[in-house]
Amino acid sequence: MKERLKKDLMKLMNLPGLSGYEDRVRKYLKKELELLKVQTQTDRLGNLEANFPGKGPSVMLFAHMDQLGFIVRKIEKDGFLLVERLGGVPEKALPSQAVLVLVAEGKDVKGVIANKNHHATEQNEKYQVLSYKKLYIDVGLENSEEVEKAGIRVGTPIVFYPKSFEIGRDRIAGTSIDDRAGCAIGLEIARYLSTRVKGPPVHLVFTVQEEYNLRGALPMAQKLLPDIAIQLDLIMATDTPDMKDYGNVNLGDGPAMSMFSFHGRGTLNGVIPHPKMVSLFERTSKELRIPLQRSAHTGALTDLSYVQLVGEGVASIDLGFPMRYSHSSLEVCDLNDLVGLTELLIGALKKIDSNFSLERDG
Ligand SMILES: [Zn+2]
């Protein structure tokens, strides 16, 4: 399983898929699901859905396909590109990054986010973070005519140059582990679901626009009206020198569940997990001897915040794999956590049957 997860993750990380432009990621997932003889449907927003019938409360299990990046705002006469940020792109991690301008498969254009020549950097500029508005992208072309001839226009999507590589023992570094790792786990769950003999109805969904507006999954949830929603994404690892005060989630110490998430800036949303979901995953973790870490902090949230409010309310939980350096061009995760999360999910799904109650009282 570890090898398969690694292969899928690295392939998925190398496919660009800015929010709203998830097509290449979806194509890969669709093809892999078809190899399993699993039928899929794509909705109008681009969410990819696979349904596995069963008995008991219905489960929507989902991970987002999209990644953050940029949109071309203006093409300068001398051929440089000015951009808008799409998603939570950290400005201090931008200068001298490699990017890929997404024109079309086979026609993408490589570029560099410029960093001012060091020899000309004044003393007072050395410790400054520049606003994205002051940054420009160099795609190596002479002028705006050449840029337009290459297919780049206002509105063209751009992502960090896709890369993935192994570091240390069983660790992966690269772009958009958030949330291609969730997608890789989704595929692995599909392999289980396509051969199981019994279990609850599961809607496996690969969603869009999470990094953009957190609501791409919403129409899918409104259509499916699931009883249970399980969202797969990163959980913030806190085992680096700069993160110690945020919790005790360690890379390589197993999957994690979020006990509290909240984002107040403009969003005012978050997820407090349903108690029956917390106890389900705690029981499963104990029985299968898969350690389960806990996370509770503000500053982050997922599309589950909106999914949980659909219909009469959905019993929800955010599950994830610890990850370092979120939203930068090089994120890091541990393959063993992905394996643990997949096994935990399969174990928990097996426990959901017609007697599984989501009652709050009694
Ligand atoms: Zn994510």
Image (cartoon, rainbow, N blue to C red):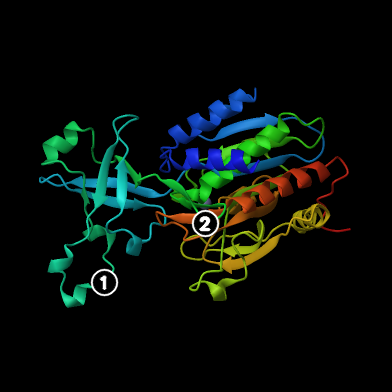
Q: Which residue is mark 1?
A: 128
Q: Is residue 214 visible?
A: no
Asked if residue 67 is positioned above or below residue 22 in the image, the reply reads: below
- Mark 1: amino acid: Gln
Q: CA distance from mark 2 to mark 1?
A: 32 Å
Instruction: Please tell me which residue lies in front, 243 or 303.
Output: 243
Q: Which residue is mark 2?
A: 168
Q: Position of residue 8 (x, y in %)?
A: 54, 38
* Left-right relation of 206 to 102: right
Residue at figure coordinates x 54%, y 26% from the top left: 31
Q: Looking at this view, name the residue that lies furthest to the front.
A: 169
Give the position of the C terminus as an image quadrant.
Answer: bottom right
Q: Position of residue 4 (x, y in %)?
A: 60, 38
Asked if residue 140 is positioned above or below residue 239 in the image, the reply reads: above
Q: Position of residue 6 (x, y in %)?
A: 56, 43
Asked if residue 245 is positioned above or below residue 42 in the image, the reply reads: below
- Mark 2: amino acid: Gly
Say whether disc 2 or disc 1 marks the residue closer to the N-terminus. 1
Q: Quadrant of residue 122?
A: bottom left
